[in-house]
Amino acid sequence: MALVRSPSPAVTLGTARRIAGDLAGGLSGPRVRAAARGIRRLLGVAGIGLADLTGTVEWAGSPPSDVDIAALVEDVLHREVKAGRPPVVALPLLVRDELAGVLVVAGAHRMSAVREVADWVSSALERTRLDALADQAELRALRAEISPHFVYNALTVIASLVRSDPDRSRELMLDFADYTRYSLARHGDYTTVAAEFHAIETYLTLQRALLGERLRVQIRVAPEVLAVAIPYLVLQPLVENAVRHGIEPRSSPGQILVRGEAEGSDCVISIEDDGSGMDPAAAARILAGHGAADSVGLTNVDRRLRSVYGSWFGLVVETAVGAGTRVVVRVPMFQPGVMP
């Protein structure tokens, strides 16, 4: 008889946290196989399968050769059975009494432990669903966060040029329409680096018209990263934040430098200003969601990056008082399930 050992509390807690992060994209997300591996380690069994509502199974370990796993999963999805033939069992994963997927366990196990893990995975999936709803609400808020002060000043500048420089006025009006269309229109969850950089250039063109010589801009993006898919509206808020907090408060000229390049299998984008900077502890509070109301864009972007790519991704803020601020975004060049 095989002995199934319970892991130590410290191991269980660490593994559970990693599994929860891997389930952030749900049972169809890019890290579901890693979640299955974590559950297998947690239970100490021969194999673990996680199936979404389509019946697609991501497997970790050795699937049994004498059991039709696909048929077993279909039975559970149709609510016909709740367990298979020992030592293989399949349990439904329920989120608020709605079927969300199937957990398949192969190998010697304690049924009480399997049920406990199934309940825990169901809870993790429920948190994922709630986080997704929160992200959608935050994205809607971010879309609507165009500063009335910026809108008023932009339209005032455009109007002032109607007589003196009608061609320039027309160009800026088209830029303003392009900016508001991208910020407010309905989009999918993802876009491309090229589209985000276009939005950045449009916004900075308008800001240069407003700030004149006080704003200097450099944008450098490598061609190989232009087609990389990223979450919609993650770069533009960072540039707006750099202008609002790094350039506008100062009377002397300031510079915004935006770079995009490939580093190995990652796309790295940085937004840097030479403004007054901030206390690193204040930056940490902002990323933790405890900053001022006008820092919501930074917090929102960090949260959405971690939700899509995992807790090891997110924003990196390099800053110090009097030393400016550099915000770095690092995402995979390709991530399964992430496409515009």
Image (spheres, helix red, strand yellow):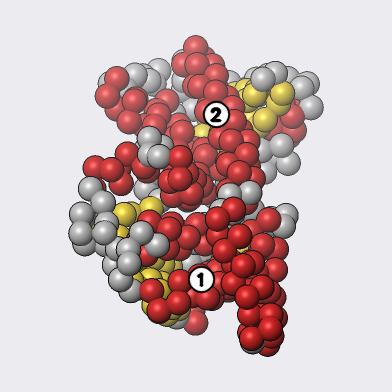
Q: Quadrant of the C terminus?
A: bottom right
Under circle 2, the secondary element is helix
Q: Is residue 263 visible?
A: no
Identity of the residue drawn at 31% across and 54% down: 317
Q: Specify the quadrant of the image occupied by residue 74.
A: top right
Q: Residue at x 49, y 75 (%)?
A: 208
- Residue 45 picture location, percent across and down: 44, 29
Q: At which x and y percent is residue 265?
A: 41, 68
Question: As shown in the figure, which amino acid type bears the numbered disc 2?
Answer: Arg
- Residue 48 pos. (x, y %): 51, 34
Q: Earlier in the sequence, mark 2 or mark 1?
A: 2
In which quadrant will I find the N terminus? top left
Q: Is residue 211 above or below residue 236?
A: below
Left/right placement of residue 247 relative to residue 68 reads left
Residue matched to label 1: 210
Residue drawn at point x = 59 percent, y = 27 percent: 126
Graded by Cα atoms within 10 Å as few (under 14), some (14 to 19) or many (20 or more), the crowding at tag 1 reads some
Q: Nearer the viewer, residue 188 or 66?
A: 188
For the residue pair 222 and 238, the one nearer the viewer reads as: 238
User: Which disc is residue 127 wearing?
Assistant: 2
| Residue type of the residue flagged with mark 1 | Leu
Q: Nearer the viewer, residue 13 or 239?
A: 239
